[in-house]
Image (cartoon, helix red, strand yellow):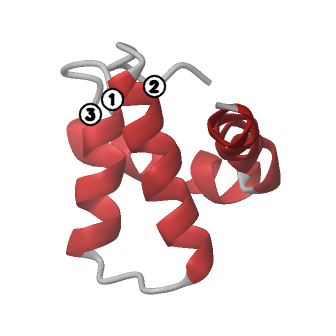
Amino acid sequence: MPQIINDSKEIEDYYQQHLEILRKIHATLKDIIRNKRQITYSDIINFIIKENYKNEIYTQIIVWCNYNIRKGNFFVDF
């Protein structure tokens, strides 16, 4: 159980580590969606995959998004 708690705290820290990249992705998605609806964590995941970003940073962002979806948070809130 302590390993799970440590892993979840590490995943929550991904947000602080990659805040600038997340803000850039969020701004790009806002332009694409044109404020027709709220941006979701799955939008971020799909954008990263569609743009073919392959890097440890983007993998951590995807893990962070999945973590938030599993917690029941669907909409991005920066």
**Residue 34: percent from the left, percent from the top?**
26, 33
| Residue 39: image tag | 1
**Residue 7: percent from the left, percent from the top?**
67, 45
Q: Residue at x 62, y 37 (%)?
A: 4
**Residue 75: percent from the left, percent from the top?**
37, 19
Question: Do callouts 1 and 2 mark residues in contact (Cβ within 8 Å)?
Answer: yes
Q: Quadrant of the C terminus?
A: top right
Secondary structure type for disc 3: loop
Instruction: Identify whether 72 is placed above or below 65.
Output: above
Closer mark to the observer between disc 2 and disc 3: 2
| Residue 9: image tag | none
Q: For the residue marked with disc 1, what is the amino acid?
A: Ile
| Residue 34: image tag | 3
Quarter where residue 65 is shown:
top left
Q: For the residue marked with disc 3, what is the amino acid?
A: Arg
Q: Looking at the image, is mark 1 or mark 3 earlier in the sequence?
A: 3
Q: Looking at the image, is mark 2 or mark 3 earlier in the sequence?
A: 3
Secondary structure type for disc 1: loop
Q: Residue at x 74, y 34 (%)?
A: 2
**Residue 3: percent from the left, percent from the top?**
69, 43
Closer mark to the observer between disc 1 and disc 3: 1
Q: What residue sits right under mark 2 in the picture?
A: 76
Q: Looking at the image, is mark 1 or mark 2 earlier in the sequence?
A: 1
Distance from label 1 to label 2 (Cα)?
Answer: 6 Å
